Image (cartoon, rainbow, N blue to C red):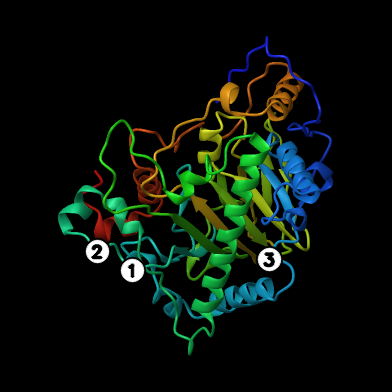
Amino acid sequence: MTPVVATSRSLNNTETSPSATPTSAASLASLSEYHLDYSQWDPSDTTSDSSQSFVRALRRAMVGIGFFYLHNTPLDSGSNRRSSIFSLTERFFQLPLQDRLSIDMDNSRHFRGYCKFGDERTQSLQDHRDQIDYGTHVKPIAVDEAVLRSRPYLNLYGPNQFLDDDILPGHKDIMLDWFDTANEISMQLTRALELALGVREAQLSQFLTGVQSPVDGEQKDSLGPLPYARMKTIRYPAGEVVDGIKRVDGSEQGVGAHKDSGWLTLLSTSSVGGLQVQDFEGNWLSVPHVEGSTIVNFGQQIENVSGGIIQSATHRVVFPAVSPEPRYSMAWFSFPALNARLKPLDALQDFNDEVINLWKEAEARRQGKEIICDVPKGDLFGTHTENFGWIAFRGLVRSHPGVVKQFYTDFVE
């Protein structure tokens, strides 16, 4: 959704927006404006020269295509987190299928666990990958069955499935450490986004924490805030047959073109390529692994509340059967809280001159042309009329028919 910007507004142009149509570049990694240094950000002093330098770089990147490299995060530097989680993930996928299926997602009403090769589909076409899905690791919400039936998204709160240490040593500890670290980075990036847009503190983070005032005179939810996040550890295997399952003939779809449905994504990848992002003219750019960095991409809910000034990136993984080795990735997703209501902010009233200038520059370079995108805009936008949990639940239901068959036949036609 393109924000309406008043042409009569007098603005000083102090920053230059990045190109969102970098047709001369084959790779996002070659574009310096899409590389940010997280070590510049000081959460204890967001007004410092270093923090403000980070905010300016974020402001430029966020009006681009929705992807950027974030260097020097706690996920990639100063610890063995990256090596530990990639080693763990490779060891998991080397286990016999029977062991992997002991944590089959179809056994979890919380949509957590292992998904076999080819189980997921994007735009009705089979994805050629397998994965483990994780979420916020908590006990199920203790409410009556009648409440769960009226609000099935409350089942998205619950425990993950982990293998015992005698099968996969460190599974639970390594995954929860990564999950919690990514969550803190997401909250810090959201604070930096507030500064980049010029909105008041917590004007964005309220959507993540779920600490909001009741909407339209409604009663405050007795369950309180329900913050929510998810994660996938993913394998894109080589070969025509994987675990006895045949690849679709001629298909190179690792995962099809899509926009992430949440707030923002932190993605760590192995050195094997295949990830691509779509620019505003519809061209596909490669997004190769860059040592010491995490890839950040914005989800549909940031695009929603920013009125389109921040675009959710359309991306895919192209991975042919003849690839010499598997591709692995760790994708962590922040979401609005399950109880959150989302309403777009007013660009004219809420955002600072700098970001409006940058967006106007980007629009001028497009010469009024619409953004070309392989994914329908706003297909999973949250609204101010229903809790975000319904959006999250519907998105999972359409991706995981096995869980629906086990637990949710009454809710889905």
Q: Secondary structure at mark 1?
A: loop
Residue at (68% x, 53% y) in the render: 295
Q: Does residue 31 appear left or right of residue 66 in this picture?
A: right
Pointer 2 local density, CA inside 10 Å: few below 14, some 14–19, many at least 20:
few
Task: Say which of 407 and 37 sits in front.
Answer: 37
- Give the distance between the C-alpha atoms of the residues marked 3 and 2, in whole angstroms: 34 Å
Which residue in the protein does label 2 denote? Answer: 142
Q: Position of residue 159 (x, y in %)?
A: 37, 69
Task: Classify residue 295 as left or right of residue 378.
Answer: right
Is disc 3 placed on a helix, strand or loop? loop
State the SS at label 2. Answer: loop
Quarter of the view holding residue 354: top right
Q: Are marks 2 and 1 in contact (CB under 8 Å)?
A: yes
Q: Amino acid at mark 3?
A: Pro
User: For the residue carrying disc 1, how many other residues have a C-alpha within 10 Å: few (<14), some (14-19), or many (20+)?
Assistant: few
Q: Amino acid at mark 1?
A: Lys
Residue under circle 3?
A: 74
Q: Quadrant of the N terminus?
A: top right
Q: Indicate the position of residue 209 as horizontal and vertical percent values.
A: 46, 51
- Residues at marks 2 and 1, CA–CA distance in whole angstroms: 8 Å
244 on left or right of 140: right
- In this view, the residue farthest toward the top is 8
Q: CA distance from mark 1 to mark 3?
A: 27 Å
Q: Position of residue 343 (x, y in %)?
A: 45, 32
Kindly identify which numbered label has been placed on residue 139: 1
Q: Please, is residue 351 above or below residue 389 in the view? A: above
Whichever of callouts 1 and 3 sits on the residue coming sooner in the sequence is 3
- Residue drawn 19% across and 53% down? 147
Judge by depth and name the residue closer to the eye, 390 or 255. Answer: 390
Q: What numbered label is drawn on residue 22?
A: none
Q: Is residue 242 visible?
A: yes
**Quarter of the image where one finds residue 332:** bottom right
